[in-house]
Amino acid sequence: MLPAHRKKLAAVLFVLLLAALALVLWWRRAPLPGAGVVLPHDTYTPHREAFTPHRGRILDRNDSVLAYTGLRYLLVLPRSGRLDSTRLNRVLGWPDSAFEYRARDLRRRELPLQLDLTAGEADILRRHRQEWPRLVVREYSARNYTVRVAAPVLGYAYNAAQPFLYQAQRLARGRFYRLRNGGLESYYNALLKGSPGAYHPLVDALGQRHGSWAPDTIYHPGQDLHLSLDTELQAYAERIMGERKGYIVALEPATGEILCYVSAPTYDPAALTGLARGRDRRELLLSPDMPLLNRPAMQANPPGSVFKLVNAAVALQLGGITPATGFRCDQSLINCVHDHPNARNLTMALKYSCNPYFYRVLQSVIDHVPDSLVQPVDTCAQRHLNLAAWTRHVKSFALDTLLGVDLPQERPGFIPTPAYYDRRRGRCGWTYGSIYSLSIGQGEINLTGLQTANMLAIVANRGWYYTPHFVRSVGNGGPLPKFRERHRTLVDSVHFDALIPGMVAALSRNGTAGLASLDDVGISVAGKTGTVQNDEGDDHATFAGFAPAERPKIVVAVYIENAGFGGLSAAPCAALIMEKYLRGKIAPKRKRWENWLRCGNLAEQGH
């Protein structure tokens, strides 16, 4: 038998042991903060919290909303029976016979009987639902566009444009439109839509969290896109282009930000994603003017005389000419359409756009034979070396490749090489006499509108550029990193300085671009006209320039199909864009040009 005091001690030790065991069990049962341990279900309840991001908005440079995701409304029509359509038109505020016209067109094409409604119209019908019980207003979430401009820029998300893409594949022109310009909506789709997230907490009876029962996925909200586009300038540019075919590209040379981007003829950006817009899409797909073609990015054409700027800069760099070099206007070499005195220097040559002068400029590069070479010289080999040097310098202007603009589809330009001519004519089967059209921007050279505008930005910046882009900031950040990288050409800045006097002189009274002058409002403009030969009709008119000439704030490139001389249509069109952007208004003497440019040129109007 143990003494009584020992029995008491044993009992105390046993109780302490039980308490320690309970403490250990309790410690092992309770999760550490942040621990992802799975615990018994009778104690904690697993929860799942899912977050779906809202698609980001698209805003212009003045923070006006251009596109957002919100509610849309459809009026679903009965397939049979009569409606008091006259009264319905009156209640909805539609013109007489508007309902009958739209419904008849849908029935004739065997399309779904549904019409787009505004939020106000949908609300009116809801309040009058007892009068028209067979009419159904359907509500759905979709992309809304607050403007009817910049359709090739805004574009569409592919998942929202499936009816359009399916319709394009069925129609005769479907193969062509597989190019599918989804615009910024497609290019930045991942950033706009964000990514959904889900959290998996373990929750007790009091709603307190105790770790997680499954891995979490991080939620990323949809980012807003802040564009460099000036919506007011964009609307103005689309209006003065009217129903013409061509393009206008305006950008800020110091940043590469695109201010205005017109592909004409254009269309309503909502037409490609609206559920009840099948008729509009069909007309766009079958139009012979191809409004869905994104011309500035996808149509490469000979640049015409605008390219003389590049040839002059490269010839100066390679030592073929100096700013003081003069050449006679010898029309036995090449036709010159302007009546002017002989160009005694480069400034005069640019002012009058003398074709024989620039024939000699490129010839001084291609046929150049260094004095140090021992005669006889292999002229074929030397010509290859010279053309290769010319090609290398021209390509440094990013004229033969994709610029990398923030659009999902872009076409490269083309600059011929010695290998190109060797494949087609044999190694020594070509001479300068067979490629001289390159001197005036014709022949095999092809550039897009974006490349032409960027080429003038390089001249404005005296030899460097940022890749043109539409989005100046994503969310609260800046543009994508690749749009902050400065690129340089192989031509020294001093040679670009030599071009400016001639480009300014071209806008004098007797220069080729006199109608683009803004001297009367105190703005100096530098530019170059071009007339692109067209074997199938009237020539195409081009102009590219910048203002102010001393400290450029805007570069404008204009291309108008079948409009004749660049100085009579493209040049005044560019002047209006520059004046609108820099002054915010148009001087009365040029106000009358706006309607003339929609359908003719200033020569026909007596300007």
Image (cartoon, helix red, strand yellow):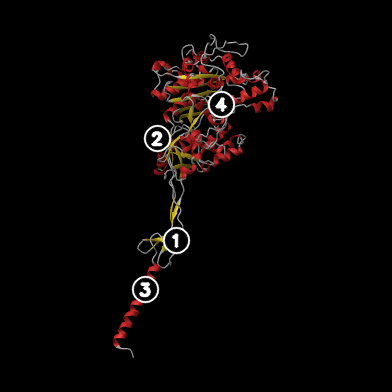
Circle 1 sits on which residue? 213
- For mark 4, give the secondary structure: helix
Label 4 Cα crowd, 10 Å radius (few <14 / some 14-19 / many 20+): many
Which residue position is annotated with label 4? 393
* Sequence-first tag of 1 and 4: 1
Task: For the residues labelled 2 and 1, say whether their Cβ atoms are less than 8 Å apart.
Answer: no
Image-based side of 469 in relation to 3, left or right: right
Q: Helix or strand or loop: what does disc 3 sit on?
A: helix
Give the residue pinned by disc 3: 22
Q: Residue 294: where, in percent of width, then height?
A: 54, 31
Q: CA distance from mark 1 to mark 3?
A: 25 Å
Query: For the residues carrying marks 1 and 3, which lies nearer the camera in this image?
Result: 3
Task: Give neighbour class at mark 1: few <14, some 14-19, many 20+ (Cα, 10 Å).
Answer: many
The reply, left or right, for residue 235 in relation to residue 302 is: left
C-alpha span from label 2 to label 1: 44 Å
User: Hey, what amino acid is under mark 4?
Assistant: His
In the displayed structure, 435 sits above or below 204; it is: above
Closest to the observer, 494 or 462: 494
Q: Residue at x 60, y 11 (%)?
A: 331
Q: Earlier in the sequence, mark 3 or mark 4?
A: 3
Can you see residue 138?
Answer: no
SS for dot 2? loop
Query: Please, what is the three-letter code of the amino acid marked with disc 3?
Result: Ala
Identify the amino acid type marked 2. Ser
Closer to the eye: label 4 or 2: 4
Question: Dot 2 corresponds to which residue?
Answer: 64
Sooner in the amino-acid sequence: mark 1 or mark 3: 3
Q: Say if mark 1 contacts mark 4, CB within 8 Å.
A: no
Instruction: Verify CB contact (< 8 Å) between mark 4 and mark 2.
Output: no
Locate residue 41: give its quadrant.
bottom left
- Distance from disc 3 to disc 4, alpha carbons, whole Å, reads 83 Å
Q: Earlier in the sequence, mark 4 or mark 2?
A: 2
